[in-house]
Amino acid sequence: MRKSVNINFFKYYKIRNGNKFFVMICMIVMMYMILEIYNGISTIKDLDSFVNSNIKEEVVPESNGANGNYITFISLEKVRKIYDLLGISNISKLSINGNIANIDGVCEDLNILENIKREESIKNLSINHIKKQESNYLFNLTYELGD
């Protein structure tokens, strides 16, 4: 009977003791990276499904008492016109209650307030008070947003 000789292909690729530690660290880092990538992908999928499930909008008008008045929604374009005329840094307070807007702010020239008065979307503009402070004017406006 003839003896068979097996060739050990892994004989030349044996890992030495010093390299075992390095290989173990590399394997741990690779497993951690794979786990983080999987968690990131699953988080993105969860967020996507959450956003897609909340896209539908339902606007239900709420009554303001027995007379049947309904709350109207304010268009941000109307408010943006005021910010464009006065400047964002010049408005210290803007509050909107229904269709009534109240602005506290600062301006350098009273012509700016006249320009606000000429806007089409502003109705019933009333200047509650104006106070001169150094080179600026402090003002408080109340107006009604129109259609």
Image: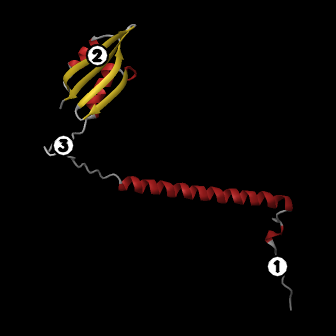
- Amino acid tagged 2: His
Closer to the chain start, of discs 3 and 2, is: 3
Identified at 28% across, 16% down, the residue is 129
Give yes or no for contact between labels 3 and 2 (Cβ–Cβ under 8 Å): no
Identify which residue, 72 or 22, lies in the foreground: 72
Left or right for 39, reference 103 = right
Judging by the rendered image, the residue that carries numbered circle 3 is 70
Judging by the rendered image, the residue that carries numbered circle 2 is 129
Question: How far apart are the two marked residues, 1 and 2, measured between alpha carbons?
Answer: 102 Å
| Element under disc 1 | loop
Closer to the chain start, of discs 1 and 2, is: 1
- Which of discs 3 and 2 lies nearer the camera? The answer is 2
Closer to the chain start, of discs 3 and 1, is: 1
- Which of discs 3 and 1 lies nearer the camera? The answer is 3
- Amino acid tagged 1: Asn
Identified at 46% across, 57% down, the residue is 46
Question: How far apart are the two marked residues, 3 and 2, measured between alpha carbons?
Answer: 31 Å
Judging by the rendered image, the residue that carries numbered circle 1 is 6
- How far from the left and from the top, in percent, is residue 54? 35, 53
Identify which residue, 28 or 96, lies in the foreground: 96
| Element under disc 2 | strand
Identify which residue, 60 or 44, lies in the foreground: 60
